[in-house]
Amino acid sequence: MERLAAWGKILALVGGAAWTIKSLVIILMNGHFQPIEGVLYFIGVGGIVLGAIGLGAFVARRWSGAARWIGFVAVLAVAIVITAVASSFVQTAVADSYSGNNVGIEEEMGILTPGIIWLLIGLWMIMARSRTRVSNSA
């Protein structure tokens, strides 16, 4: 579980950063920037999925026995569902309220939201881990 958690915090940051950069550039340019856009999209997907696995391990490592594995699966599932729901909610809200000429802004806002969420989750896992180490060494 420790190794999954360690990789997960790094990959959550990478995935979140990839989606954040991708969507911000497209929003600011009001258009696509191929071929790197697709690369950033897939790096983001992989990072977020593997980050969710790491988040499950990060939370569940404190438990033991069956609770550890049940918790791992539950956290993983909830993380993926919340990511999808947040993305969909923001995308729908922007599509319903935006009347400007920025083509595809609703899709990019739907990608920016999970990007920021996973950047924050990765930072939280790193900060929580470093606080634990400082507390244990004191």
Image (cartoon, rainbow, N blue to C red):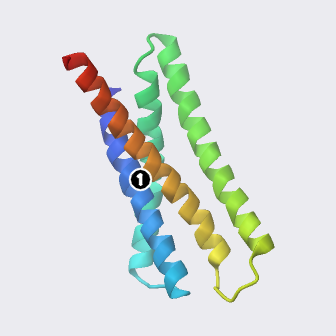
Name the residue: 67% across, 72% down. Answer: 106
Position of residue 87 measured from the top left corner of the image (x, y, whole percent): 64, 58
Q: Which of the 4 quarters of the picture holds residue 90?
A: bottom right
Name the residue: 78% across, 73% down. Answer: 97
Position of residue 29 measured from the top left corner of the image (x, y, whole percent): 50, 86
* In the rendered image, the vertical position of residue 128 relative to residue 30, given as above or below: above
Quadrant for the C terminus in the image: top left
Badge 1 amino acid: Gly
| Front-lying residue, 78 or 28 | 28
* In the rendered image, the vertical position of residue 88 relative to residue 97, given as above or below: above
Task: Let me know if residue 4 appears in the view.
Answer: no
* In the rendered image, the vertical position of residue 101 relative to residue 116, given as above or below: below
Q: Answer left or right for 77 relative to 34.
A: right
| Residue density around tag 1, few if under 14, some if 14–19, many if 20 or more, within 10 Å | many
* In the rendered image, the vertical position of residue 112 relative to residue 121, given as above or below: below
Question: How many marks can you see?
Answer: 1
Q: Which of the 4 quarters of the picture holds residue 70?
A: top right
Position of residue 24 measured from the top left corner of the image (x, y, whole percent): 49, 73
Name the residue: 34% across, 37% down. Answer: 127
Residue behind mark 1: 47
Quadrant for the N terminus in the image: top left
Task: Let me know if residue 137 appears in the view.
Answer: yes
Name the residue: 42% across, 56% down. Answer: 15
Position of residue 17 measured from the top left corner of the image (x, y, whole percent): 40, 60
